[in-house]
Amino acid sequence: MKTIGIADTTFARFDMGFAAINELERTGTGFRIERYTVPGVKDLPVACKKLIEERGCDIVMALGMPGPKDKDKMCAHEASTGLIRAQLMTNKHIIEVFVHSDEAEDDSELAFLADSRTREHAVNAYDLLFRPDNLRRNAGTGQRQGFADEGPIKRR
Amino acid sequence: MKTIGIADTTFARFDMGFAAINELERTGTGFRIERYTVPGVKDLPVACKKLIEERGCDIVMALGMPGPKDKDKMCAHEASTGLIRAQLMTNKHIIEVFVHSDEAEDDSELAFLADSRTREHAVNAYDLLFRPDNLRRNAGTGQRQGFADEGPIKRR
Amino acid sequence: MKTIGIADTTFARFDMGFAAINELERTGTGFRIERYTVPGVKDLPVACKKLIEERGCDIVMALGMPGPKDKDKMCAHEASTGLIRAQLMTNKHIIEVFVHSDEAEDDSELAFLADSRTREHAVNAYDLLFRPDNLRRNAGTGQRQGFADEGPIKRR
Amino acid sequence: MKTIGIADTTFARFDMGFAAINELERTGTGFRIERYTVPGVKDLPVACKKLIEERGCDIVMALGMPGPKDKDKMCAHEASTGLIRAQLMTNKHIIEVFVHSDEAEDDSELAFLADSRTREHAVNAYDLLFRPDNLRRNAGTGQRQGFADEGPIKRR
Amino acid sequence: MKTIGIADTTFARFDMGFAAINELERTGTGFRIERYTVPGVKDLPVACKKLIEERGCDIVMALGMPGPKDKDKMCAHEASTGLIRAQLMTNKHIIEVFVHSDEAEDDSELAFLADSRTREHAVNAYDLLFRPDNLRRNAGTGQRQGFADEGPIKRR
């Protein structure tokens, strides 16, 4: 039995944690979920590290929706840097799923994007843990999460 | 009995430390306070780490008011990066409460924002320590600290 | 027998992993390959560290194609910072091969660039491991990977 | 007997180290000084760490005058990040005193600023070591070093 | 007998490694040289750390010539951050000598700058190791490497 951590925020405007858990349960079995909700994205790095070191998670999804201002983009950058550091300190993957409000035209599209990107990354997390050959088969094929895939390119 | 650290600065123009302690005491019991005042936000990371490792704090609030210039924004970025690093080194939460002077129209609004954001984050700190289910219930609901909440969004 | 790690992504639009392995095998012998595919460039740092610490790699190539937006450039910066950190934690080289989509005029040139830069860096990785004198002989000679070399300059 | 480290640079155009030592000696007793001069601000982080770990300093002042170009500002950012990291690795304060050449109108004002900011921070360093209540009393009062204090603000 | 490490790149267009070694040998005795050539500046941090930890260097010079594009400046920033981190992990100085192509008008001036800056920093490295009083005497005097010194300034 593996443990998958789900770290999310009260700042986000969409329940990405629900989307992640729902998709993971549709994707396969053999794991249990540990969920940890924090105020904002800058609280995610230590939450993810605690999920790994104190609650035994084998992999974690870090879910957040940074705001639109320059200050918010800097917060997202600081959070991302911390998430990578947390991974290097634990040798475990933390799949970052950040949805930026300026990626969508309106709230409805933003909610769609938050939902679909979270779900596609939930499958990535499952694959990293249980079936890495799925990722191997798609190496260099231009996969995208939330938007349409870009696909592979070739030399002339 | 838990210990909550309050790290603040002489640079800030509002007594955010008082606001934090006052709000924590209105919110609940079961903790004692350790306060540590430093000159500016770049001194906060090590102050918070010392609060955790030398004064036994279970969680810390890092309170600051970065100035308006580009140089000040860079200081805030460096401080934030250090606060995340300090959390990863200790596996304890440090709730950053930074109020930027260009977030308000005048000094009075800035003081209001410093006061209210500190108080709302004091409740977040209390929740992380004593009642994480409060945060869990608000996951993905667009909570904000100091300004009005943005609320949740839905897919069409 | 040495072990060379190849970390690549499903986000990339060209199979840089194949190019790296193919070129390494044309360059010499005395090594085996460990390949690890992750979703995107921000997943590369921990993948490389795991290749070194869990699968015994002596050197790793980190292959990725960051997207064209500002957000993508920030992801690449965060990934690069993590790759350097991973090297300092393990005392092993991780050769970063990133191809940015705005480095080429069209998809075909981009594929050419991804292929040729990966292959030239595969030789660099081989040299670091097996024949460092090759690098020493080219010190300060303006070598480039993927584009034409710039060559050395002289004082008048 | 405490030890206060003074790390400064040959790049700076004002003898900030002298100003720091002179002001510390005017402020109180109970300490000895260890001085360490390096070429530029990027050499300060390890110099400060060596002052703490190899020469027994209880606190360090890191004194520098970054140049005016974008490249210089990036150097200052890298140095600041390293100074915070050094503090987190040692659990000791390093008081950064950086004076940027574009903060003053001419060389004379720049020298004045370097002198006065260093001296005010020397008192901060002394207070952190010997009388933290002085800082505690000034929490949230808008203290500045080198320029006039901004003072506290109030909610209407 | 001390050991001085020289880490340089094949990317650089001038043989900065030769300039460093030549100047060190003109400056004094009592040391031996360890040279390590890597492809680019982002490979320098781990090379320097390996020089210190695996080849016993007491100090290292990290020599590089970042390119002119924004992407190149970001590489230089990532490398510098890593060089500072490597110093903090080893408590040894790494003297960074980076020459940016946009610092000079043409190739000839660039070569002159690479040569002279490397040589002046070679003396700094020697002084840090063998005669720190030379640096101490020049504290706050506006020393520059490669261009003319700026000299000290005074309060009116």
Image (spheres, coloured by chain):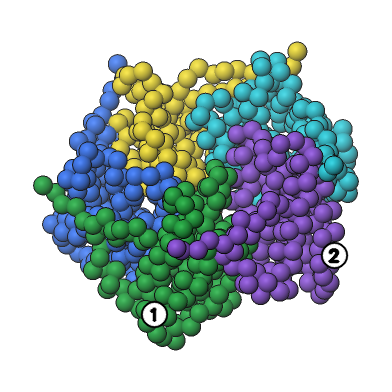
Chain colours: A cyan, B yellow, C purple, D blue, E green
> Compared with residue C133, is residue A147 higher up or lower down, i.e. above or below?
above
Can you see residue E100? no
The amino acid pointed to by label 1 is Arg
Q: Secondary structure at mark 2?
A: helix
For the image, the number of numbered tags is 2
Task: Farthest residue to the top: give it.
Answer: B156
Q: Which mark is residue E119?
A: none
Report which quarter residue D32 is drawn in: bottom left
Q: CA distance from mark 2 to mark 1?
A: 45 Å
Report which quarter residue C39 is drawn in: top right
- The percent position of residue C5, horizontal first and vertical second, equals 77, 61
User: Mark 2, chain letter?
Assistant: C
Which residue is under mark 2?
C25
Quarter in which the N terminus of chain E is drawn: bottom left
Task: Farthest residue to the front: give it.
Answer: C156
- The percent position of residue C25, horizontal first and vertical second, equals 85, 65
Q: Secondary structure at mark 1?
A: helix
Residue at point 49% right, 25% down?
A: B145
Q: Which mark is residue E26?
A: 1
The amino acid pointed to by label 2 is Glu
Of badges 2 and 1, nearer the viewer stands 1
Residue at point 63% right, 68% down?
A: C138
**A8 or E82: nearer the viewer:** E82
**In the rendered image, residues at marks 2 and 1 fall on the same chain:** no
Q: Crowding at label 2, few (<14), some or many (≥20) Cα neighbours within 10 Å?
A: some
**C71 or D152: nearer the viewer:** C71
- The percent position of residue E77, horizontal first and vertical second, equals 51, 50
Task: Farthest residue to the left: give it.
Answer: E156
> Compared with residue A125, is residue E57 higher up or lower down, i.e. above or below?
below
